[in-house]
Amino acid sequence: MILVTKWFGVFLVDRDRIVKKVLFEKDPVAIAAKLAKVQRGELLPEEERLAVKRMKVAEPRMSSLGKPEFLDSSFIRAEDFGYSQQLRQKAMVELGKIRTREPLPADRFILQAVRGMDDLIETINLMSERLHEWYGLHFPELGDYARERRYAELISQNGLREEVLSVLDLQLESVGAELDEKDLTAIRSYAATLASLYEEKEALEEYIAGRMEETAPNISAVVGPSLGARLISLAGGLRRLASLPAGTIQLLGAEKAMFAHLRQGKKPPKHGIIFQHPTVHRAPYWQRGNVARVMGGKLAIAARVDYYGGEYIGDSLNDDIARRVEEIQSKYPDPPVEKKRRPQEGRRRGGKDRPRKMGKGRR
């Protein structure tokens, strides 16, 4: 016998004959609540009530009750038990409402925060470039003494060149032009907006770090919360990152280089965004591929442990990485010797073909 769950009830079937059944209440809200449990992979009380020994089930979701086996259950029709298509439609609408109100996994918020951070960085870079050109008409030398947020704050809080020099305790003669009051007001307002964006960027970084410590502590321990969040964003979520092989994680962020290798025959990439990790980018160029491979393997383990709710093993993973990096350094201490290419036979230095010697009987 096989246990089958339809949208209107649960049935225990022997071939094409219904042995037992438990029908759902003819209420769209009640039906939707049961279907939501089914979609979440949970067992229904009706299914446990009809379960018998040595039976099979029609879905892997019920594998704890029996062995899954395919069954064509089209002979069990809702109309035969008094359930109309209008009731089904209303139940599906209620099901949609229930699923949309369910809490989302934390990695969805991390993904959006990282993409928001990218948008914010792009905006900051554009506005910073514009501010340097705009205020540079008045005080072009300021860029040598202040950068990024400090540059914007000095302009928004002080404005005139003389006041900025006083704050920095500098004495120099600028080649910039003088500003009218209305021009200075506009520049200071623009600089204040840019300074507020820098503050928002720092707040967003703190939010991402906190979320990563809660959601993916092992990934954060291996590569840091910022880089770990970017890996989750590139993969499309923690669940997909946990399903990727180590080699794919190693190359996340290097898709263009990989396509260039496949289509144009260029050298394959050895690493993707994990190049930003100090362990990788500080390694000598001939060791980076092996180091990146080690990082990709440990990240694959960390992602799986984080997704399936395992214990914290970040310290152990970092110890393994440090040990493997030492082995790579001792095994490959010197750069590889490049082999010299031999000139092709039958060619001169200038690249021209040697004339062939004519054999006997040839002209």
Image (cartoon, rainbow, N blue to C red):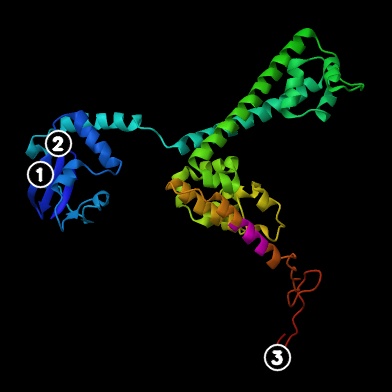
Q: Main secondary structure of the magenta part?
A: helix
- The quarter holding residue 45 reads top left
Kindly identify the amino acid type of the residue bearing the numbered disc 2: Phe
- The quarter holding residue 319 reads bottom right
Residue 361 tag number = 3
**Stretch of the chain drawn in magenta:** 320-327
Q: Residues within 10 Å of mark 3 (few under 14, many from 20)?
A: few
* SS assignment at label 2: loop
Q: Is residue 172 left or right of residue 358?
A: right
Percent position of residue 323, x then y: 63, 60
- The span from disc 3 to disc 1 (Cα, nearest Å) is 97 Å
* SS assignment at label 3: loop
| Quarter of the image with the C terminus in it | bottom right
| Quarter of the image with the N terminus in it | bottom left
Give the residue number, with chain letter if any, for mark 1: 21
Give the residue number, with chain letter if any, for mark 2: 24
